[in-house]
């Protein structure tokens, strides 16, 4: 008997609708294969939502997301909305959505698929075989701490953001780190700045205390500046990485570029009852609607949805195989290399569908 899952698609801004359309096609094909019924609904978030309703996260969208089994997000933001007040910029809608759904853990794999190693800006011998999972704390830290804002003090403007983490917030994200490491190679790197920031000194202490519950996991610590350097120098030393919201935001993008293109990297935001899945890349408004975007990160995000929200690991592996098979011969512009055939966003999606049929 088939199972029905409610999926909210929030295509967002820029290339979001372009890549989401291709990902939804793949989602539907794989669901059919695994006897899963999908109930899809589209709701606005980000800049397009502001244009329609005056807010980047309308109540209707939030309510639909809370009633869903999973959410697929395209991308949000763009120069068009940068002049807006900070409180209603597209990114605020996404931050509120993460907070409302208690999505405190962001899983960002950085994997080199197939022969894409040649698309990396680093030497083959440095990046070949890279397979890193960056776990970023997502609902705390400097992005959410109070007090915050810009005030006038002593006759000049002063900006203030507060880095704050409670023990329980650190414990729950570290737990995700240890449990993820157990499913990979039992190695966990915790990244902090404990030599300068008291907040991350607490982070390190809590992670060490929790490590006693995971004696099978090899734990090491690294300051964030060294971690950034080591990612470029020797990325294969890393397996599972857990870190704060700000450090994770930066390091996961750096890890993404090891693989050749940020257009290849999916992500999963989990922690509450409902998972949110999105590509790591931005909205790229300069190529929106031109059939130039790379949909593979969003397609791979669908794979993570099957794995983490629906417990269908096999479906995720099937999608990854289809992507690897496709890029052996065809590439979008961002990952193009000699000897491959250049295709657009829609054709890339169609080719992945074709590869799925052959597997």
Image (cartoon, grey):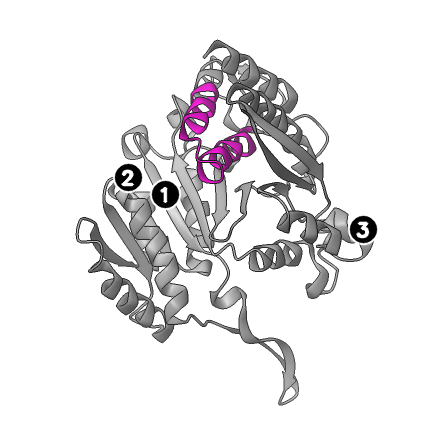
Asked whether 291 falls inside the magenta stretch, the response is no
> Which element carries disc 2, helix, strand or loop?
loop
- Does any portion of residue 229 appear in the rendered image? no
Q: Which residue does the numbered mark 2 point to in the structure image?
A: 184
Quarter of image, res 39: top right
Work out how far the residue at label 1 is from the one at label 3, CA to CA, in angstroms. 36 Å
Q: Residue at x 54, y 22 (%)?
A: 35
Quarter of image, res 222: bottom left
Q: Magenta span: helix, strand or loop, mainly? A: helix
In this image, 234 relative to 272: left or right? left
Circles 1, 2 touching at the beta carbon (< 8 Å): yes
> Considering only vertical position in the picture, is 278 above or below 342?
below
Circles 1, 3 touching at the beta carbon (< 8 Å): no
- Within 10 Å of the Cα at label 2, are there few (<14), some (14-19), or many (20+) other Cα atoms? some
- Residue 123 place in picture, x, y as percent: 33, 32
> Which element carries disc 3, helix, strand or loop?
helix
> Which element carries disc 1, helix, strand or loop?
strand
Q: Nearer the viewer, mark 2 or mark 3?
A: 2
Q: Which residue does the numbered mark 3 point to in the structure image?
A: 51
Q: Pick whichever, 162 or 337, lies toward us.
A: 162
- Does any portion of residue 356 appear in the rendered image? yes
Q: Residue at x 52, y 57 (%)?
A: 102
Q: Mark 3 or mark 2, which is nearer the start of the sequence? A: 3
Residue range in magenta is 296-323
Q: Which residue does the numbered mark 1 point to in the structure image?
A: 133
Asked whether 319 falls inside the magenta stretch, the response is yes
Work out how far the residue at label 1 is from the one at label 2, CA to CA, in angstroms. 9 Å
- Mark count: 3
Q: Quadrant of the C terminus?
A: top left
């Amino acid at each position: 008997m088939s199972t029905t899952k409610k999926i909210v698609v929030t295509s967002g801004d820029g290339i979001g609708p372009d890549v989401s359309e291709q990902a939804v096609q793949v989602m539907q094909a794989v669901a059919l294969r695994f006897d899963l019924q999908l109930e899809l609904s589209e709701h606005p978030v980000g800049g397009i939502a502001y244009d329609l309703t005056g807010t980047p996260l309308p109540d209707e969208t939030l309510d639909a997301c809370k009633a869903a089994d999973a959410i697929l997000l395209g991308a949000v933001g763009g120069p068009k909305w940068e002049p807006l007040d900070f409180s209603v910029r597209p990114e605020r809608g996404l931050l509120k959505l993460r907070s409302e759904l208690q999505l405190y853990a962001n899983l960002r794999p950085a994997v080199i698929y197939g022969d894409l190693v040649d698309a990396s800006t680093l030497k083959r011998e440095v990046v070949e075989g890279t397979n890193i999972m960056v776990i970023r704390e997502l609902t705390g830290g400097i992005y959410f701490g109070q007090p915050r804002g810009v005030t006038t003090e002593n006759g000049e403007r002063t900006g203030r953001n507060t880095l704050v983490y409670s023990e329980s917030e650190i414990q729950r994200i570290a737990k995700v780190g240890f449990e993820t490491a157990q499913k990979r190679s039992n190695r966990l790197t915790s990244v902090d700045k404990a030599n300068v920031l008291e907040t991350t000194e607490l982070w390190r202490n809590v992670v060490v205390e929790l490590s006693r519950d995971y004696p099978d996991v090899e734990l090491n610590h690294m300051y964030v500046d060294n971690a950034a350097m080591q990612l470029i120098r020797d990325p294969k030393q890393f397996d599972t990485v857990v870190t704060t919201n700000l450090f994770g935001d930066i390091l996961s993008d750096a890890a993404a570029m090891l693989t050749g293109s940020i257009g290849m990297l999916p992500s999963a935001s989990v922690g509450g009852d409902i998972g949110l899945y999105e590509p790591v890349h931005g909205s790229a408004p300069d190529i929106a609607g031109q059939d130039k975007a790379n949909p593979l990160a969003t397609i791979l995000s669908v794979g993570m949805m099957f794995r983490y929200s629906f417990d269908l690991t096999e479906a995720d592996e099937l999608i990854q195989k289809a992507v690897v098979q496709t890029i052996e011969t065809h590439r979008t512009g961002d990952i193009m290399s000699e000897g491959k055939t250049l295709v657009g966003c829609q054709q890339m999606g169609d080719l992945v569908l074709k590869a799925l049929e052959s597997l």
